[in-house]
Image (cartoon, rainbow, N blue to C red):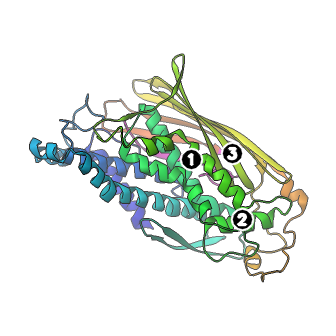
C-alpha cells in the first residue's frame, strides 16, 4: 500500500517537474478519493505531455501555445528535440490516434478507474473507520476489475458496512466530478481524458446491470450492489430498495452531458491537436451546464441536480440532493468555487456542504454484521434497531477555505484546503467529525 502511494507521488512530481502545464498532487489524511483523483490526473497529464512530445506536429504541447517548456525541463526538452518533424507528421493520422487510444489510453484509463475505486474508494473508507472495525488485507488490481481484501471485526455495524460497500462508487463519482471541474476551469476538454470520465460517471450503471435479483440472504459474490441491497433492506425494514430501482435510476447518470460528448465526439474530433469545446448555456456573462446524477447512500438511493457555472476563469460547482427510503427523507446542498478572490500572490475560494439525513450507526444493534451474514436462508431477519433510532436525523455541514499561494508564473504554487466537517455521511469525507486538511502543489491543468 505504501509503495503505491509513494509511486503516485513520485510520478506526480515527475509530471510537475518536466512540464509547465500541471495539475495538483494532493496529500490528505487517509488518502481520500479527492487526493486519489488529483494525483491520478497529474500522472495522466504527464503521460499526455509525453505523447504530445512524441507524436504531435505542434511546436509546443497542447494547451501551451502561449507558454514555453521550463528551462530546467531537460527530460521534456530531450524528448522534443529527438523527434523529427517528418516522423511526427507521419504519426499524426486518424488510425494512429485510434491505435494509441485503444492500445495505450484505454488500458491506462481503465487501470486508473479500477485503482481509484478500490484503493481510494473502499480502501479509504476502511482507513477512515480504522482497524477497530476492519483491517485491510490487500488489493487486487487487474486493469478491468479489482478487489479490496479486508477482515471486518465483531464491532463493525451494518450501517458502517454499507459505507464500505458504496465507497468505490463514491470514489468513481468524485473522480468524474474532479475531471469535469478542471475541464470547466479551462473551458475545453482533452479527448484522452474522456474515457476515464465516462467509466467513472457510469460506474453505478455498470454495477447495477450485473445484478439480477434483490438478495434476501447474504451474498457471496463480492458484488458491491448485491451486498448493498441485502444490508440496506435488512437495516431499514420499513423501506425497500430493489435491484430494478437501482438499475433503472442508474440510467439517469447517462444523461450527463459529458457522457454524450464521449459517445458522439469521436467522428468530429479525430485529432488530439484540437481540444473539444464544452457546450454550455449562456446567461449574460455566465455559462451554465446542468447535469442529473443518482447515487447510493447508507440509507437509500439519492438524486443529485448538479450545476456547473463559468464566469471568465472562475468555475463554480453547486448541487442539490434529495432522497427517500420508506419513512426517511434526506436532502442537502453544496457549492464550491476555488477562485472567488484573486491577487498577484494568492487566490482564495471556498466549499460548503449542508445536509439533513439519518445517522451512520456506530453502536451495535440486535445482531452484529457477522451474525447477519451467517443467517441461514429462509430465516427471518429481526429488526436490528428500534424504529426511532433508524428515523433519527441530524443536520450537518462541511465548510472549508480553498486557496493557493504564489505568483502565477512560478513553477509551482502552494495549494491548500482547510476547514471542518461535523459527523455524518458525506461522500469522500470522514464519517466522524474531523478537520478538513489537504495540501499540495497547484498549477494550470
Residue at 63% of width from left, 71% of height from top?
Answer: 134
Q: Is residue 274 left or right of residue 179?
A: left
Q: Secondary structure at mark 2?
A: helix
**In the rendered image of this protein, does residue 158 appear above or below residue 418?**
below
- Total marks placed: 3
Q: Are marks 2 and 1 in contact (CB under 8 Å)?
A: no
Disc 3 element? strand
Q: Position of residue 25 (x, y in %)?
A: 41, 48
Of the numbered discs 3 and 1, the one sitting upstream in the chain is 1
Disc 1 residue crowd, few under 14, some 14–19, many 20+, Cα 10 Å = some
- Please say if the residues under marks 2 and 3 sit with CB atoms less than 8 Å apart: no
Q: Position of residue 177 (x, y in %)?
A: 53, 44
User: To which residue does mark 2 refer?
Assistant: 229
Of tags 3 and 1, the one toward the viewer is: 1
**Mark 2 or 1 closer to N-term?**
2
Q: Is residue 28 in view?
A: no
Q: Which residue is mark 1?
A: 254
Quick one: which residue is furthest to the top in this view? 284
Residue 156, given in percent of the width and then of the height, sits at 71, 70
For the residue pair 85 and 392, the one nearer the viewer reads as 85
Quadrant housing residue 188 = top left
Asked whether, in this view, residue 83 is left or right of residue 336, the answer is: left
To which residue does mark 3 refer? 303
Nearer-the-camera pick, 232 or 5: 232
Circle 1 SS class = helix
Residue located 40% across and 47% down the image:
193
The range drawn in magenta is 421-445
Q: At x 24% / y 50%, what residue is drawn?
A: 96
Q: Is residue 136 magenta?
A: no
Q: Does residue 439 belong to the magenta stretch?
A: yes
Q: Residues within 10 Å of mark 2 (few under 14, many from 20)?
A: many
Amino acid at each position: 500500500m505504501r509503495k503505491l502511494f509513494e509511486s503516485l507521488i513520485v510520478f506526480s512530481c515527475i509530471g510537475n517537474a518536466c512540464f509547465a502545464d500541471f495539475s495538483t498532487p494532493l496529500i490528505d489524511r487517509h488518502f481520500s478519493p479527492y487526493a486519489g483523483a488529483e494525483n491520478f490526473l497529474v500522472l495522466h497529464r504527464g503521460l499526455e505531455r509525453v505523447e504530445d512530445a512524441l507524436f504531435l506536429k505542434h511546436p509546443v504541447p497542447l494547451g501551451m501555445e502561449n507558454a514555453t517548456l521550463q528551462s530546467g525541463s531537460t527530460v521534456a526538452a530531450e524528448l522534443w528535440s529527438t523527434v523529427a518533424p517528418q516522423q511526427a507528421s507521419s504519426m499524426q493520422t486518424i488510425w494512429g490516434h485510434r491505435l494509441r487510444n485503444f492500445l495505450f489510453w484505454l488500458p491506462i484509463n481503465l487501470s486508473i478507474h479500477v485503482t481509484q475505486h478500490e484503493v481510494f474508494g473502499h480502501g479509504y473508507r476502511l482507513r477512515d473507520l480504522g482497524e477497530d472495525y476492519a483491517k485491510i488485507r490487500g488489493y487486487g488490481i487487474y486493469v478491468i476489475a479489482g478487489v479490496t481484501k479486508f477482515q471486518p471485526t465483531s464491532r463493525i455495524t451494518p450501517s458502517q458496512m454499507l459505507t464500505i460497500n458504496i465507497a468505490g462508487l463514491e470514489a468513481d463519482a468524485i473522480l468524474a466530478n474532479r475531471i469535469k471541474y478542471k475541464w470547466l476551469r479551462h473551458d475545453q476538454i482533452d479527448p484522452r481524458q474522456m474515457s476515464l470520465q465516462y467509466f467513472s460517471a457510469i460506474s453505478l450503471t455498470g454495477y447495477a446491470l450485473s445484478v439480477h435479483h434483490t438478495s434476501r440472504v447474504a451474498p457471496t459474490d463480492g458484488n458491491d450492489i448485491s451486498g448493498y441491497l441485502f444490508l440496506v433492506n435488512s437495516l431499514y425494514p420499513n423501506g425497500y430498495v430493489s435491484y430494478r430501482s437501482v438499475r433503472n435510476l442508474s440510467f439517469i447518470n447517462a444523461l450527463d452531458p459529458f457522457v454524450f460528448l464521449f459517445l458522439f465526439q469521436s467522428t468530429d474530433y479525430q485529432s488530439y491537436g484540437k481540444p473539444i469545446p464544452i457546450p454550455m448555456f449562456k446567461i449574460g456573462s455566465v455559462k451554465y451546464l446542468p447535469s442529473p446524477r443518482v447515487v447510493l447512500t447508507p440509507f437509500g438511493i439519492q438524486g443529485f441536480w448538479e450545476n456547473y457555472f463559468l464566469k471568465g476563469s472562475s468555475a463554480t460547482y453547486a448541487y442539490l440532493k434529495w432522497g427517500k427510503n420508506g419513512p426517511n427523507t434526506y436532502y442537502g446542498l453544496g457549492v464550491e468555487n476555488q477562485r472567488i478572490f484573486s491577487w498577484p500572490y494568492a487566490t482564495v475560494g471556498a466549499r460548503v456542504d449542508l445536509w439533513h439525513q439519518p445517522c451512520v450507526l456506530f453502536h451495535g444493534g440486535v445482531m452484529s454484521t457477522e451474525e447477519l451474514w451467517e443467517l441461514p436462508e429462509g430465516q427471518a431477519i429481526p429488526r436490528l434497531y428500534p424504529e426511532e433510532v433508524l428515523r433519527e436525523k441530524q443536520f450537518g455541514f462541511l465548510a472549508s477555505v480553498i486557496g493557493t499561494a504564489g505568483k502565477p508564473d512560478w513553477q509551482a504554487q502552494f495549494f491548500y484546503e482547510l476547514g471542518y466537517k461535523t459527523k455524518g455521511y458525506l461522500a469522500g469525507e470522514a464519517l466522524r467529525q474531523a478537520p478538513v486538511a489537504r495540501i499540495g502543489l497547484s498549477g494550470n491543468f
